[in-house]
Amino acid sequence: MKKLTILLTLLIFFGCSKDDSRADENPDNQLDPEVAENVVIILDDKSNLTSSESDLNSGIYNIDFTSEVPEINTNDIIVGDEGEGFLRKVISVSSNGNSLSMQTTQATIDDVFNNVNIQFNTDISESSRMANPVTQKTQVNYIRKGVSFYKNGLGYNFSNTVLYDDGNATFTITNGNATFDPNFSFNADYSFFGGLDFLEFKADNANLEINCDFDVTVAGSLSLPEFSETLLDYDKYLTFLVAGVPVVVVINTQLVAELNASIDTNVTWLSSWTNTFGVTTGVKYENDNWTGNFDLTSDLELNSMDFGGQVNIAQNLTITPRASLKFYGVIGPYCQPELTEDFNFNVASPSLDWDAELKAGLNLTTGVDITIFGNTLADFSSTDSYEEPIWNAPTSLTIESGNNQTADQGQILDEPLKVKVIDALDNPMPFVPVYFSVTAGGGSLDEESVITDENGFAQVFWTLGDNTDSQTVEVTVKKADGTNIESITTFSANSEENEFEFTGSYSGETTDFVGNCSNSDNAGDWAFTFIVNDNNTITFTSTAHSLLNEMTTYSFSNNNLSFSIDIDYGGVQDCEDPNNGGDWIATLSFNGVYNPDNDLFDGTWSVNNIFSPQFPACDITNYSCQQSMIIN
């Protein structure tokens, strides 16, 4: 066939049967396809491609014909439907009977058609059907032991898959399945003069879901920079005619798991999650420009997390159902959604503060390798990413018991201050350092840092400050970098005045003889006894210092005792004039605090001497003295 012009409108859909009715029946928007004069079609049922793989890689196409040998010249374009199909430009040709040997280079669809629209829909399942197929088949290239696919090729089961095992470290997907059901839409327009004018490849509202239980056991340290395992590889072959020319499309799907990890020492963990994405993605070439499109809905859920160990960990698992469309054996459009799981555990030394986080997300690359479509454009791809934490620990700190207690000032509370540390799933977190600190009241704690037990609990005992001020203790948990987790807890307590009963008889005595007098005199030794009366007074019972039967009021509050009494010590005489005299009044006072530890009042004894009149020449002037005094 050296020249073939067919004036018709052709719009081909293939995909799920539910989409077969979507053919555009409006001829005003369609093109009249025309095939270039130098196109030669070579059909599989009338020929046999005998080239080796090495020959094909070198562009050598050896073909035996079972019928009439077609006329093929230099610069002709040969189109074949054998295998993945081929689309080649002939550089040289030689014949031998019914066989031709051709040296070729890669041709493009642009070399074949003028004024053509190639448009179709397809999914990656084995059961989809096109409207008018020439051939269709599915071929499994590789399937890992234990892996299966179902839902007509849209779902995959890879439970009990050991991704890595070197004797010391094992990474196993104990339960795993994924669903990927894109309905790809391809649309390309070629004009008579301009080549490729428009190209769009997209998937609307594709469902992407993964359920995975991931079990990790490591004995000793491990550094696994990158590890990749193909779980499944299969092809779906489709051949249809455009203006009498066979167009061969192969949809290749690969399910690939990639793993990398860095772990300090012994550790085990089992995580289980379900991630569901609704994805719309695509790339478009129009008006000499490429654009990308991306829209995402997500539902990420952690089912369980069981972790044992305290080491630095960085681990990433990626499950990718890669889908690509090959035209005549050459990759064109492709879509690679990487379902990611990242687990990180950080621990500080020597404090052992730690934090852990599990993230899930999607890295989606959609693009077109332009090689098969034309010679004037560059390849294009668009990558979009989404990630969010689905678990972290320690997450929060809650009061379990011991808040809002009441005790006497300076006393230990009856109940300990008890807290609980949990993760994002409300699981108790053991081996977490918890920090307690007195923030008001001046009290003390029996410990300031406590490691949580297997149930996530930590507790300390609190002795209140020796006052009735506000009493608080703050509790924090730190991450490995030293910052606090967002949850900070505060305990409060009520400190009451000690219930000391100030009754009975007491004796007071200064503890030093000299004291401190404003006139440098010797203060002397003071001692007395008194009885506490019911009417808020005291009566002195000693004869010392003229205090016998003297009475005064007292004040006793917040363990503080104070009283004051005036004593008339009689008259004084002017040394210069015996007929001239005056009065001497002394104000005696005490101010001290009760100490329950030794059952004493410890304070200051003051004596303020007032002379009226004063006789400076006789050294008779007002003065005061102060000394330390104990009353018991």
Image (tube, rainbow, N blue to C red):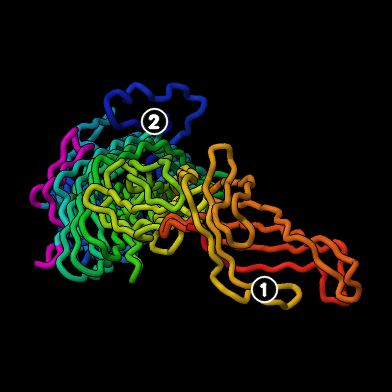
Residue 297 seen by the camera: yes
SS type, badge 2: loop
What label does residue 11 carry, if any? 2
Quadrant of the image containing the N terminus: top left
Image coords of residue 110 (percent x, y): 43, 50
Picture coordinates of residue 161, whole percent (x, y): 13, 51
Q: Is residue 607 above or below residue 474?
A: below
Q: Amino acid at mark 1?
A: Asn
Mark toward the start of the polypeptide (1 vs 2): 2
Q: Which residue is mark 1?
A: 516
Q: Indicate the amino acid at tag 2.
A: Leu
Figure check: 561 above or below 136: below
Mark 1 → mark 2, Cα distance in angstroms: 115 Å
Residue 351 in the image: state x and y as whole percent: 35, 67
- Residue shown at 44%/42% (left/top)? 282
Q: Secondary structure at mark 1?
A: strand
Decide: is 60 above or below 381.
Answer: below
Q: Quadrant of residue 258?
A: bottom left
Q: Which residues are magenta?
A: 145-169
